[in-house]
Structures are given as C-alpha cells and as structure tokens.
Image: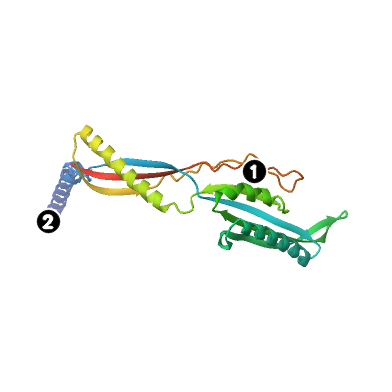
C-alpha cells in the first residue's frame, strides 16, 4: 500500500477521534443557563371585596300586545289602539315618554293547513309589539300593574327592581375593596416575613352585582275582580371585587 495513502487514512482517523472527543466534552459539560435560570419577580396576590345593600329606585316592566286579523290593517289598528290606551294611562302616573321603549314590532303572515295533502292556506296576519317601561316612582308600581289588567295584553314580565345609576356606588365599593386588599396584604406580608413594595398588578371583577328581586304576591289581568298587586321592592346587593399583586423583597 502506498505510504502517502496510509498517512492520509491515519490523519482522517485522528481528526475524527478529536471531533468525537470534543462533542463528548460539550455534551457532558453543565449548561449554566439551565442550571441557573433567571428568577422571575417575587410577588404575592391578594383579593379584596366590598358589598352594600341598596334600595332600588327604578322598576321595569316588559309586555307584549298581539293581534291576529284577516288583514294587516285590522291587526295593526287593534294593536295601535290598545298601545295608545296603555301609554295614555301610563302618562297619568307621571311616566315620561323617554321611559317607554318599543323593543320589537313584527308583522307576520299566518297559515293553516287543510286536506289530506296539508295544503297551506293563508290565515291572516299577526302583529306583535313588545314594549318596556321604567317606573321611577316605586309607589306607583302596584297601581300600574293593576291598571294594566284593564288592557288586553298577551304577556307581562316584571317588575324588575334596580338602581338606575349605580356608577357612583360601584366606584365607592371599588375603593373599599382596594383598601380591604391592602389590609390583607399587610397582614400576609408580616406573617410571611416579607416586605411589600410596589403594586405591580390590578384586576377588577369576577363577581358581578347581584340583585335580590322582590316577588309579586299576585295581581289580576282582565278579570272581573281586580286584586291590588303587592310588590315589595326589597333591597339590591351590590358587590365589588379586586385583585392586587404586590412586589415583595
């Protein structure tokens, strides 16, 4: 075998051995980044809550007036007449037009099916008007419900009692919830033996306001003997919740 050729083979084998040795060295050497990762900021999170019982100042009613007639004109006239009468006596109770709102108004054809083959035949038209009103004088709620019985309505929902403008109350409760969280954090920091630094995180919510609606004892609609409605408004429970994250040392 040629001497030069043998020398080349030996050189290649030596180089390969050196490469494998280096690879083995770096594979076994510890990685400083893995053994000593950067530590994240040290923090603790504390929740705070506040709540308050508040008397509602507004009630809402939702009702539907519906009519089926052979023609659209007849159905519309019937619904319009009853709606006009209803809104008229609502104004007598001091309810403003801005507190009367039409949620939907629909005109739909109706059909009947006849014969063995269930042939579809026109069966007139139905008009539906869905409305919502707000009653700001809660002393009138019972009387309004009783008077509604004089009008032919097809569905009534309510009353629902609520606070019409509760933003100031919620803002006050949020301040109380923050103060509550800070008090808890001070106690927790002392128990843990750590010192609180800056607030680095804030979260609000997670527990919406709950409303304790009073229920009606009963009232009559279009009956011979009207029963005066008894609708206690009760109280609403408003809640605020926050989460504060404190940096510690």
| Residue tagged 1 | 229
Q: Nearer the viewer, residue 238 or 36?
A: 238
At 69% from the left and 62% from the top, the residue drawn is: 84
- On the image, the x and y values in percent for residue 128 come to 69, 59
At 70% from the left and 50% from the top, the residue drawn is: 149
- Most distant residue in the bottom direction: 73
Checking the image for residue 71, the label placed there is none
Cα gap from disc 2 to disc 1, whole angstroms? 116 Å
Quarter of the image where one finds residue 197: top left
Q: Going by the image, does 163 lie left or right of 6? A: right
* Label 2: few (<14), some (14–19) or many (≥20) C-alpha neighbours in 10 Å: few
Label 2 or label 1, whichever lies nearer to me, is 1
- On the image, the x and y values in percent for residue 31 come to 18, 44
At 36% from the left and 41% from the top, the residue drawn is: 49
2 or 1: tag closer to the N-terminus: 2
| Residue tagged 2 | 4
Residue 50 visible within the image: yes
Q: Going by the image, does 66 lie left or right of 143? A: right
* Label 1: few (<14), some (14–19) or many (≥20) C-alpha neighbours in 10 Å: some
Q: Nearer the viewer, residue 22 or 220?
A: 220
206 above or below 123?
above
The answer to whether the residue labelled 2 contacts the one labelled 1, judged by CB atoms less than 8 Å apart, is no
- The C terminus lies in which quarter of the figure? top left
- On the image, the x and y values in percent for residue 60 come to 57, 52
112 above or below 43?
below
Q: SS for tag 1?
A: loop
At 68% from the left and 51% from the top, the residue drawn is: 147
Residue 118 visible within the image: no
- On the image, the x and y values in percent for residue 224 come to 77, 45
Q: SS for tag 2?
A: helix
- Most distant residue in the top direction: 191
């Amino acid at each position: 075998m040629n001497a030069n050729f043998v020398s080349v083979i030996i050189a290649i084998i030596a180089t390969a051995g050196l490469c494998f040795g280096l690879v083995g060295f770096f594979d076994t050497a510890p990685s400083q980044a893995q053994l000593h990762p950067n530590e994240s900021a040290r923090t603790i999170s504390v929740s705070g809550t506040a709540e308050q019982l508040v008397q509602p100042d507004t009630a809402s009613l939702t009702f539907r007036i519906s009519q089926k007639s052979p023609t659209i004109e007849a159905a519309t006239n019937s619904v319009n007449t009853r709606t006009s009468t209803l809104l008229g006596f609502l104004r007598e109770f001091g309810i403003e037009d801005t507190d009367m709102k039409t949620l939907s108004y629909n005109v739909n054809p109706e059909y009947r099916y006849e014969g063995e083959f269930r042939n579809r035949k026109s069966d007139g038209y139905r008009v539906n008007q869905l409305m919502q009103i707000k009653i700001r004088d809660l002393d009138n709620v019972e009387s309004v419900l009783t008077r509604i019985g004089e009008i032919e309505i097809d569905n009534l929902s309510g009353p629902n009692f609520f606070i019409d403008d509760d933003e100031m109350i919620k803002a006050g409760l949020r301040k109380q919830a923050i103060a509550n969280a800070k008090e808890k954090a001070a106690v927790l920091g002392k128990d843990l033996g750590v010192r609180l630094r800056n607030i680095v995180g804030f979260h609000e919510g997670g527990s919406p306001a709950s409303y304790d609606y009073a229920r009606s004892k009963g009232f009559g609609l279009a009956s011979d003997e009207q029963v005066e409605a008894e609708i206690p408004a009760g109280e609403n429970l408003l809640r605020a919740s926050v989460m504060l994250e404190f940096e510690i040392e």
